[in-house]
Amino acid sequence: MEQFQPHAVLISCGPLRAPRRALNEAALDTGQELHHLAASFAGAVAEEAATLASDSVRRGRLTSADFTTSWWKLVRRIVLGRQARDDDQITDDLWRLRRAANWSFAAPRQARRRARFEEQIYRYAETADPESLLGALTAIPVTGDLDPIGQLPHWLFAFDAAGMATIRAAALLATHPQQLSRCELTEPDQPRLRPYLRACVQESVRLWPTTPALLRETTADTTFDGTTFEAGASVLICVPAFHRDTEELPFADEFVPEIWIDGRAEGYPQLVPFSAGPAQCPGQNLVLFVTSSFIAQLFSSLHLELTSSAPLSPERPLPLTLNQFGLEFGAQPVTAASHSN
């Protein structure tokens, strides 16, 4: 991560970590169910989802590629501002920097691309859109050593996972009519909480974690199964092993959004769709708002039928993996679909 977000909270340590985390939480309104810019974000969601729905009706289908293009236009608007909507270059650069970073020391550092990426972010910061996360961030007075703009790459990076969760949740709802009937689809333009839709997104991430491995360090000497590990030991947590444990979870391979509403999920602390502890995702409420709003917009406008080969059904266990890039839906306007039923 140092190759594309060297000053982000996630990899900060020492005296800078706490104030960077506090700044991050302030900009994201971590403690609030709705971000103070929720109305602006809801407007952006409505516009981008309406364009996607219109294009899908015209083509008669909605593909993963269509969704991804629309999603990144929305993400750039929310994170960087309206002026960044069509700036494919900045997110393409981020994608390539991330791909190189996955190889760690084995891949050469892309200094020129990183410089261009950072320069463009700072250019947006100079005239920050007040209705964007960047605007919210730059409105907070801070000292220069915190490098607040250094958090932007991580926000863009995190919304990639949010997009995966969104289209997978759409695939689940398209194949689970009982759950779809419970979704809050009325007044999709309104910035409000949609508990059941939020739960659908959480369940999507439980079933197919977007971060399948969590890396942690022990902060004190810790004993596991009779073996003691000293403080500072690295721990790798394989998230799917806990989220799909059929011996512990009666709903392991089923789509059950209700567990996130009725308190059952709280009885299983191993369920961590947004991580947990000091490194828990500070943008959880914001992500759930944006994703649930986008899904509400889509399903209030479209009847979606999953036409790709993903074997999703309430009648059998859900697959252990789901390639979101291969998802494709047949798309009809809701009114036309209603007449055909």
Image (cartoon, rainbow, N blue to C red):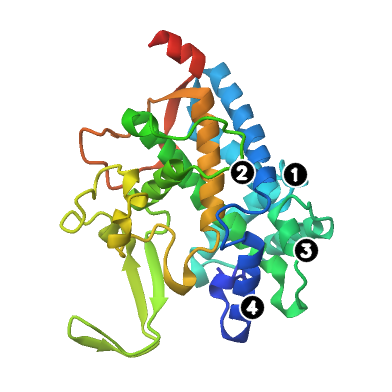
Look at mark 4 in the image and give the residue it sits on. Answer: 19
Q: Nearer the viewer, mark 3 or mark 1?
A: 3
Mark 1 residue element: helix
Q: What label does residue 72 carry, if any?
A: 2
Whether 149 is drawn above or below 50: the answer is below
The CA distance from mark 2 to mark 4 is 29 Å
Look at mark 3 in the image and give the residue it sits on. Answer: 139
Using the rendered image of the protein, determine whether residue 274 is visible from the camera's viewpoint.
Answer: yes
Identify the amino acid type marked 1: Arg
Look at mark 1 in the image and give the residue it sits on. Answer: 82
Identify the amino acid type marked 3: Ala
Q: Position of residue 109 (x, y in %)?
A: 61, 68
The image quadrant that residue 3 belongs to is: bottom right
Whether 67 is drawn above or below 202: the answer is above
Whether 160 is drawn above or below 196: the answer is below
First in sequence: mark 3 vs mark 1? 1
Farthest right residue in view: 127
First in sequence: mark 2 vs mark 4? 4
First in sequence: mark 2 vs mark 1? 2
Identify the amino acid type marked 2: Trp
Using the rendered image of the protein, determine whether residue 65 is visible from the camera's viewpoint.
Answer: no
Q: Position of residue 115 (x, y in %)?
A: 73, 64
Which residue corresponds to the image point at 51% horizontal and 49% vertical from the top-left? Answer: 288
Q: What label does residue 178 carry, if any?
A: none
The CA distance from mark 4 to mark 1 is 28 Å
First in sequence: mark 3 vs mark 2? 2
- Badge 1 density bin: few <14, some 14–19, many ≥20, Cα 10 Å: some
The CA distance from mark 3 to mark 2 is 24 Å
